[in-house]
Image: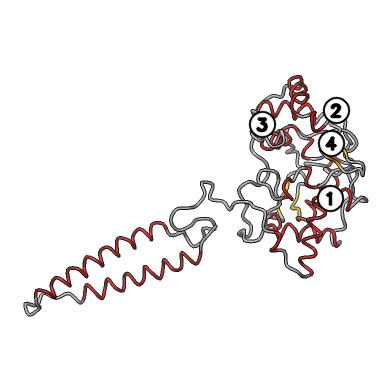
């Protein structure tokens, strides 16, 4: 991120250096009346000025541009030139009404099924996919999402607000019902996302948004996907992708198929979207251990296992630009 104070101090230093330079040079004299000791002191002063000018040139070369939101003095910017995602310290949640909304949003994120049973039609939580409290890089993190939205989305064929995007997850990933746009729970979720976004530059998509990239030109092999699913996924998600559950109905490991999972209109029901998540984060704790082809094969297999059907999904991508892995 941009280091304004340091850049400002560098600018002041440059100005001071140039002022010293001008004063020192104009103070030089060729008068024969000047003593030898003065000549030595004058030469030393000129040498100091030259050293300062060289340092100034170094600073000028490394100072960030005024509109650069990520560069730092000294060349410490990341290779991607994007701000990084991190989970802020929970102690920074303020002790006021806004802080109460942030805490409610965090509670909803991690316990969506229990907190909003009227809106969740399966037994998933937001953090089933948005890992790490919704703040893990390359697991569809929420950091800075409120400042990136409204944004045009091809699935809707129009600009969506962040509230509409959240409701899309409730209707698809949660196989449930939308929240009232102005409800306290909706405000809590947006408040939590905003708190996650502290210190990030407005409107900038951070490094780690979404999922890792996979090769979408790969053709899936569902037979190999079934074999790999049995080897690498069933220990957590069950032989049929049904998940594992506690006595109170909450899950130990979420369902990736069946009635307790996301419906076929969810992004995770698409082969290449699911493959990107699998590639970066699965098997759990072993992210990036599978090849692109293996991730695509597994995704093609489990995304086509039985699951709820999304109503009115024929209205998605109204402009006819649907990706090839969209479920119809």
Distance in Å between CA atoms under marks 1 and 4? 15 Å
Q: Which mark is on residue 312? A: none
Q: Nearer the viewer, mark 2 or mark 3?
A: 2
Q: Which mark is on residue 255? A: 4
Residue placed at 27% from the left, 71% from the top?
A: 21
Image colouring: secondary structure
Q: Earlier in the sequence, mark 2 or mark 3?
A: 3
Residue placed at 79% from the left, 57% from the top?
A: 105
Distance in Å between CA atoms under marks 2 and 3? 25 Å
> In the figure, is residue 122 to the left or right of 215?
right
Q: Earlier in the sequence, mark 4 or mark 3?
A: 3
Q: Between 288 and 316, which is closer to the camera in this rendering?
A: 288
Q: Which residue is mark 3?
A: 216
Q: Earlier in the sequence, mark 1 or mark 2?
A: 1
| Figure quadrant of residue 290 | top right
Compared to 239, does 5 lie above or below?
below
Compared to 132, does 25 lie above or below?
below
Where is residue 70? Give x, y as percent.
Answer: 53, 56
- Label 3 crowding class (10 Å Cα cut-off): few <14, some 14-19, many 20+? some
Q: Which residue is mark 1?
A: 111
Distance in Å between CA atoms under marks 4 and 3? 25 Å
């Amino acid at each position: 991120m941009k280091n304004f104070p340091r850049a400002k101090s560098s600018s002041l230093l440059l100005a001071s250096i140039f002022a010293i330079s001008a004063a020192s040079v104009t103070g030089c004299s060729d008068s024969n009346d000047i003593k030898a000791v003065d000549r030595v002191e004058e030469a030393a002063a000129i040498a100091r000025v030259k050293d300062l000018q060289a340092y100034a040139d170094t600073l000028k070369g490394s100072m960030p541009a005024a509109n650069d939101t990520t560069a730092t003095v000294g060349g410490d910017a990341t290779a991607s030139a994007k701000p990084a995602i991190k989970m802020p310290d929970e102690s920074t949640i303020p002790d006021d009404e806004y802080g109460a909304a942030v805490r409610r949003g965090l509670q909803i994120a991690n316990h969506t099924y229990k907190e909003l049973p009227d809106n969740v039609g399966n037994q998933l939580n937001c953090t089933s996919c948005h890992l790490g409290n919704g703040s893990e890089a390359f697991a569809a993190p929420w950091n800075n999402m409120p400042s990136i939205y409204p944004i045009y989305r091809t699935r809707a064929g129009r600009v969506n607000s962040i509230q509409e995007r959240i409701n899309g997850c409730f209707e698809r990933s949660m196989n449930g019902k939308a929240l009232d746009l102005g409800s306290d729970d909706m405000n809590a979720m947006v408040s939590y996302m905003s708190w996650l976004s502290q210190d990030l530059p407005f409107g900038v998509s951070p490094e780690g948004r979404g999922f890792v990239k996979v090769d979408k030109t790969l053709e899936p092999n569902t037979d190999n996907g079934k074999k790999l699913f049995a080897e690498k996924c069933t220990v957590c998600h069950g032989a049929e992708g049904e998940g594992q559950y506690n006595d109170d109905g909450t899950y130990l490991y979420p369902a990736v198929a069946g009635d307790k999972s996301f419906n076929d209109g969810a992004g995770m029901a698409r082969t290449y979207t699911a493959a990107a998540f699998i590639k970066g984060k699965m098997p759990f704790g072993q992210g990036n251990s599978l090849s692109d082809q293996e991730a695509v094969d597994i995704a093609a297999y489990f995304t086509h296992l039985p699951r709820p059907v999304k109503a009115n999904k024929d209205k998605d991508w109204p402009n006819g630009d649907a990706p090839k892995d969209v479920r119809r």
